[in-house]
Amino acid sequence: MPFTPSPSDNFTFGLWTVGNTGRDPFGEPTRPRLSPAEIVELLGEVGGVRGVNFHDNDLIPIDASPAESRQIKADFARALKRHKLKVAMATTNLFTDPAFKDGAFTSNDAEVRAYAIQKTMRGMDLGAEFGAKIYVFWGGREGTETDAAKDPIESEARFRRAIDFLCDYSRSKNYGYRFALEAKPNEPRGHMFFPTTGSYLAFIATLKHPGMVGVNPEVAHEHMAGLNFSHAVAQALAANKLFHIDLNDQQFGRYDQDFRFGAADIKSAFFLVKLLEDNAYKGFRHFDAHAYRTSDRKDVIEFARGCMRTYLILKDKARRWNADPEVRRLQRTIRRDNARLDELWSRYSATSAAALSRREFDRQAMAARPLPYERLDQRTMEILLGV
Ligand code: GLT
Ligand code: MN
Ligand code: MN
């Protein structure tokens, strides 16, 4: 069957995504809580998945005894083996426990900050035990409701010190982790620090080990801020910083929806898949989404299959778009290359600057050149709609 995923497609799901119980701020769970091993069983039933990701406490409850923890890990490892799934990414839950009510690395309480570092070190140990090579940092509580609460410059410095320390920890243990920082503008905090992927790209350059740190952009998080997700991903790709990606969907201006990939905005999803595929993105394609609260187990399986199937359909559409004769013809009209003109300002020299100063331009002629973007966009729509 076409558009059937296979492990080589590099699709992954978090334990918290297909394991989501449907709880929201207004209502209790609508689905039973599954154990990590049961979630792996479910992913096995979905089929074609490469791997699974977890927060420390998705796997081991925060107050589990050593014996409980050993049992959970053994069951999880057995399920992974049975379904030939790997652990792709690990991360730390630094947002659920009330101790983190005012943040983790940026908390105003030195004891909370130290505990957050310790919890992350242990989370890294746990991820490494299962072979994870990507470690995500999503600062769910790093932020404020009132800016009277924290000095934003000091908060950034605390966050930097935490990442620098944890990079050194990973190196000392030879874990080989690459860190991926995940931005979000708000929810659960009123204002979260590092609201966009661009904020993290600028921050990375200030770190002690910038080479081992990249980003984990999420569709919904940039869309919540009303931004163009593909542009953020493009900047990360160009900087060789796209270490991981969280795929889902989101209506602009709504609460954090985490919808099935492509469920809200097909055109944005198409240009995103095209960007990733055209640039041969090698990393995992993680669906950080969950099924509607109304779904039962069977429908959760449909949700997971839908994420992957939509991705593969859009990948095929991107191939068609690239090969489409009309798209190609329109592109030839739109792109007016002139290597000799580019050469004049590609590298500064006194001669080229003088030549460029002397050059005469015909503004009317430039303004009169056609840009048939309406036709190009309509052709894009027709390809997407299968006409
Ligand atoms: C949480 C958040 C996600 C993050 C996860 C990693 S947890 O579900 O909404 O966007 O990627 O901590
Ligand atoms: Mn995410
Ligand atoms: Mn989200």
Image: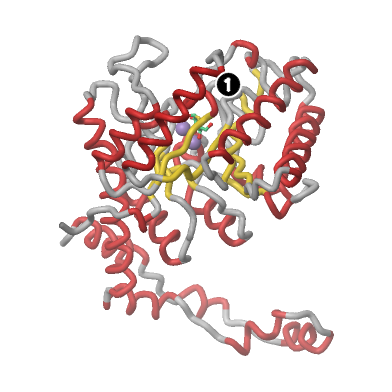
Locate residue 380 relative to residue 341 in the image: left or right.
Answer: left
Looking at the image, residue 338 lies above or below residue 212: below
Q: Amino acid at mark 1?
A: Phe
Residue sitting at x 58%, y 29%? 92
**Residue at label 1?**
95
Locate residue 178 relative to residue 171 in the image: left or right.
Answer: left
Dot 1 crowding, Cα within 10 Å, few <14, some 14–19, many 20+: some
Looking at the image, residue 148 lies above or below residue 77: above
Q: Position of residue 294 (x, y in %)?
A: 24, 21
Looking at the image, residue 329 lies above or below residue 257: below
Label 1 CB, ligand 1: below 8 Å?
yes
Choose top left, top right, bottom left or bottom right for residue 278: bottom left
Residue sitting at x 49%, y 55%? 283
Element under disc 1: loop
Choose top left, top right, bottom left or bottom right for residue 134: top right
Q: Nearer the viewer, residue 365 or 233?
A: 233
